[in-house]
Amino acid sequence: MKTITSFICLVFFAAAAHSQQLSQVSFNGNAAVAWFAYGTEQDVLIRISPEGKVMDYGVEVKSFRYEYYAPKLQPYMGKIEYYGNDVDSMFRGKLKSIGICSLTYYASYETDGRPGKLKSIGRVNFDYYNQYDDKMLQGKIKFSGTSQLQYYNSFDEENFRGKLKAFGGTAFTYYSMFDDKLIRGKIKSIGTMNYLWYTSADRSDMRGVLKSPSYRQNINGVIYILSY
């Protein structure tokens, strides 16, 4: 009986640990972060903005024939709860839990621009850059669990400003003002993965299009998605 109980506890903590993981990062056409997605133990994705707002949640669907994933998440058919009217005003109407994954938010009495922002998903806690930080960083997520997020600031090259510079141990670089005009500001590397784009010297129908690798890459256990 003791062995069975220990096994159940091990499974529970393994599931809880899984829900802590960053699963995906999506970039918009300007190479700025569109959203971060955190996966739960029930294969649900919770997408949040760089400023800590829950944007969407559900299940990702893949095509049966092609390496294609629908950009819109499908509804999760399990239990979903929202905060009611008997709580702090900053919580009301917001997502409280999906499956067994709970979400919390900073209350109205918090300082430094935190009220209403996402505080935790499962066991992942979030903190934010405040009004004393560079204007390009203010309000953005600073910590996701123990991982620090760094951004290019207002003193950096214009093509880089406000863009993600590092997430924990993964660094991000971008093409600069010295590169071809069609690829300036586009992602140049994520970690050790280099991104190549067609330039103004290529065929007119290919200019500015990603050459390699594909728009969806698994790098250090996280899926990075670039917009077409």
Image (spheres, helix red, strand yellow):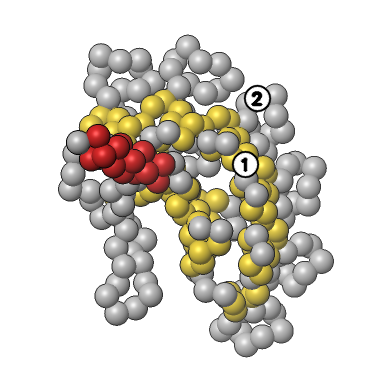
Query: Left or right: 103 with respect to 77?
Result: right
Packing grade of label 1 (10 A; few <14, some 14-19, many >=20) is many
Which residue sits at x=52%, y=74%?
Answer: 214
Q: Is residue 219 visible?
A: yes
Residue ID for mark 1: 149
Query: From what the image shows, is residue 173 above or below residue 166?
Result: below
Which residue sits at x=36%, y=31%?
Answer: 103
Please state which amino acid type lies under the numbered disc 2.
Answer: Gln
Q: Quadrant of residue 30?
A: bottom right
Q: Residue furthest top?
A: 109
Query: From what the image shows, is residue 75 above or below residue 116?
Result: below
Query: Does the residue at mark 1 contact the one at mark 2 (Cβ under 8 Å)?
Result: no
Q: Position of residue 191 (x, y in %)?
A: 65, 60
Marked residue nearer the N-terminal end (1 or 2): 2
Query: Left or right: 106 with respect to 60?
Result: right
Tell me the distance, in whole angstroms, between the alpha carbons under discs 1 and 2: 16 Å
Q: Nearer the viewer, residue 33 or 38?
A: 38
Quadrant where the N terminus sits is top left
Packing grade of label 2 (10 A; few <14, some 14-19, many >=20) is few
Q: Secondary structure at mark 1?
A: strand
Query: Left or right: 93 with respect to 206?
Result: left
Residue ID for mark 2: 131
Please state which amino acid type lies under the numbered disc 1.
Answer: Leu
Q: Nearer the viewer, mark 1 or mark 2?
A: 1
Q: Position of residue 199 (x, y in %)?
A: 68, 78
Query: From what the image shows, is residue 118 above or below residue 4?
Result: above
Give residue 207's mark: none
Q: Secondary structure at mark 2?
A: loop
Query: Left or right: 116 with respect to 163?
Result: left
Which residue sits at x=51%, y=58%?
Answer: 221
